[in-house]
Structures are given as structure tokens and as C-alpha cells.
Amino acid sequence: MTDRLDQFQRAISGDRRALARLISLIEDRPDESHGLLADIFSETGQAFTIGITGAPGAGKSTLTDQLLMHMRADGHEVAVLAVDPSSPFTGGAILGDRIRMQGHASDAGVYVRSMGSRGHLGGVSGATSRTIVLLDAVGFPYVLVETVGVGQAEVEIVESADTTVVVVNPGWGDSIQANKAGLLEIGDVFVVNKADRVGTDETIKDLKQMLMMGPQGPWVPPIVSTIASRGEGVHELWQTILNHRRHLIDSGALVTRRRRRCEAEVRRALAEEVARRTDHAATEGGFAALIDEVVERRTDPWTAARSLLD
């Protein structure tokens, strides 16, 4: 534990290797990382987290890369968690997203880390929320989380981000009509990327109509058109994100959102702890006898599970 706290202090001082080792600890040995995260948690709550999500091929990585340029131009240090599909052989991230951000490799104010989804649904990694805690404690004022390509139902990023940016492409209108839940409900800002393609105006119109049909609140999600490959519209997107941040702070919604995030994290931790204790109990001799009772219909699976937890 002393060694990990030493690595944490070095990470605060800008040692990227120490930071990388700590993130690897969180990813590979979550039980061992608990003590460190518990010690540093009181120092967190300062970083503003921006989630960038959307379907595969929407241009999220290119958009994130361009967004980084504008954030750095304003003098902000930024950490990026790029959630990639996992390799079927090693379980590690397939580094496609990180490769697209190599232009920032020599910038000490940017830290980019790829994370394998490792089969975790929702577009993020199971270690995403804990890694955000570490990056927050290290001192990054902004954390960008780019999800793996997601569908309508994979919207877990909303439990990790203060502002969620949903990226779509022209021609996505039919999908919106058929699946108005999911991504449409979590978006704080919508981006129609690749706006030089045919169908951009129709997609913007469809988005506006679907948003009008949903619940109306004090913040109406703006729709920004971008051509990320040329950097067009990205400055407007950055200013829109800043406007949303000001709205969250001024309205008090930021406190409410972060309370919900804390609740979600406690529930995740509770589920993990129950699973860990159940696995431990299952290794004891009585488990096999309990299974025998279920097989012989002398008890049912649900009563067996409750007795195991008891």
C-alpha cells in the first residue's frame, strides 16, 4: 500500500508511468486497488467529466481528437479514457481510438489511456468509473470518456459523465424514429458529424422532432453540426459543452447528477461485494450439498440463494 501511495504522489507530480501502473492495477486487480481508491476518494469531486458516445463509425475518435485541441488552446489539462473493443486473445484494448490521438502524444497536458471493454456492456469498461476517480484525484480538471461504439440500449456512460455528447451521422433518422429511447434520452448535446454528407438537414430535423416529443426540462439539448475530419464545428461544440457546464452549476443540477452517480457507484460496489462473498461461500463444502438439494427438488434455487447469502 505504501508503494501505491508513492506511485500516486509521483502521478500527481506528472509521472505518467506511475499513473499508467495505477490504472493497470484498477483494471487487472480491482480488489487490490480498493485501499488506494478509498484513501484518495476524499480528494475527488473537482474534475468535470465529458462522455462522448454514439454508434460505431460515427467519428467519435476524430471528434475527440479535435475537441482536445480546443481544450488545450484554452489552457486545460485533459485526460482521455478511450474504451476500445477487447482483443479476443489477450483481453486488452484494440488500440484504434488511441492511434487516432497520436498527435497529442508529446503534449504533457494530455493523457490518453485505452481501456478494453472486456465484455462489459454499456459502452464503457467495468473499471471506467474507478479510473475517473483516480484521474480526478491526480488533478485533471477535465476527463473525456469516449465509449466503444454503442446501440440504443447501451447507455451506461450517463452514470460516469457530467455532460454526455451523443454523436450521430446523416441518415440516422430512421433509427431515431424506431428507437427513440436510449441514446436520445441521455444526450445533453447532440452532434451530427460528417455533416458534409447528404441527409444532414433531414437528420437534424428528425432529431429536433424526437427531442420535442420527449420530456421537456430547463435544458434543451442543442444540436451541433461538425465535420471532425476537417475540424469544422468543433469550436462551437466546445462552447456548447461549456454552456452546459455553466447551466449545471447555476441550476444546481450538477450536484443532483453527481449524487445519482454516487448512488450508482455504491450499488455497483455492493453488487461486486455480494458476488465476491458468494463466490467465497461457494467454495466451501456446503455449496455442493445445497446444489444436491436443488437437483433433488428438496429446495428451490431462490431459497438456496437466500440461504447462501444468509
Image (cartoon, rainbow, N blue to C red):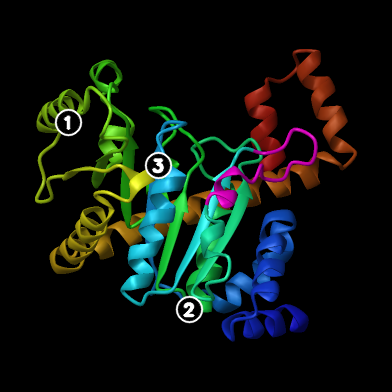
Q: Residue at x 10, y 40 (%)?
A: 216
Tag nearer the camera, 1 or 3: 1
What's the residue type where badge 3 is placed?
Answer: Thr
How many residues crowd mark 3 within 10 Å: few (<14), some (14–19), many (20+)?
many
Query: What span is colored magenta in the figure?
Result: 86-100
Which circle's residue, 1 or 3, is located before the other in the chain? 3
**For residue 130, side relative to residue 186 (left or right):** right
Q: Which residue is mark 2?
A: 139
Foreground residue, 233 or 39?
233
Looking at the image, which residue sits at the far front?
Answer: 230
Looking at the image, which residue sits at the far right?
Answer: 285
Foreground residue, 90 or 106?
106
Q: What predominant SS class does the magenta segment belong to?
A: loop
Query: Where on the picture, by quarter, is residue 215?
Result: top left
Label drawn at residue 53: 3
Tell me how far mark 1 sits from mark 2, CA to CA: 37 Å
| In the rendered image, the vertical position of residue 158 relative to residue 19, given as above or below | above
Q: Is disc 3 placed on a helix, strand or loop? A: strand
Q: Residue at x 27, y 49 (%)?
A: 232
**For residue 154, side relative to residue 217 (left or right):** right
Tag nearer the camera, 1 or 2: 1
Q: Is disc 1 placed on a helix, strand or loop? A: helix
Q: Are marks 1 and 2 in contact (CB under 8 Å)?
A: no
Residue 150 at what x, y percent from top left?
45, 32
Q: Are marks 2 and 3 in contact (CB under 8 Å)?
A: no
Query: Where on the picture, by quarter, is residue 120?
Result: top right
Label drawn at residue 204: 1
Tell me how far mark 2 sits from mark 3, CA to CA: 24 Å
| In the rendered image, the vertical position of residue 266 relative to residue 246, given as above or below | above
